[in-house]
Image: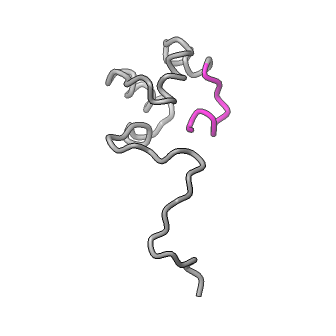
Amino acid sequence: MLRAERGITRRQLADALGVHYQTVGYLERGEFSPSLHLALRLSRYFEVPVEVIFSLDPFPRLGAAAPSSNGSSGSA
């Protein structure tokens, strides 16, 4: 998501990290768990904490509706 938001291609990111562009695709699809070194390089590249990119808990799928806490719209 960070890559797409910033208009960076898979190839550009791969070149910056020194990995094959397919590795970026595998990471994005959750088909590959990076080494700690690669995870930290990604974090540095995007200038965000590593926890923003990786988590032990699965991220919600893009386009999934956000759960409502009480079912109300919150407007008064």
- Coordinates of residue 57 in the picture (x, y in percent): 35, 44
Q: Residue at x 45, y 30 (%)?
A: 30
Residue at left offset 56%, top offset 38%: 1
Assess whether residue 6 is covered by the magenta stretch.
yes
Residue 65 lies in quadrant:
bottom right
* Front residue (pair 76, 40): 76
Q: Is residue 38 magenta?
A: no
| Label total for image | 0
Could you tell me residue 45's position as x and y percent? 49, 29
Q: Residue at x 34, y 21 (%)?
A: 35
What colour scheme has been applied to the protein in the rendered image? one colour
Measured as percent of width and height from the top left, residue 40 is found at 37, 28
Say left or right for 58 vs 15: left
Extreme bottom residue here?
Answer: 76
Spot occupied by residue 22 in the image (x, y as percentages of width and height): 55, 15
Q: Quadrant of residue 74?
A: bottom right
63 vs 3, nearest the viewer: 63
Magenta residues?
1-10
Q: Assign the C terminus to one quadrant of the image.
A: bottom right
Instruction: Say above or below: 41 vs 5.
Output: above
Q: Residue at x 39, y 37 (%)?
A: 54
Q: Nearer the viewer, residue 54 or 48?
A: 54
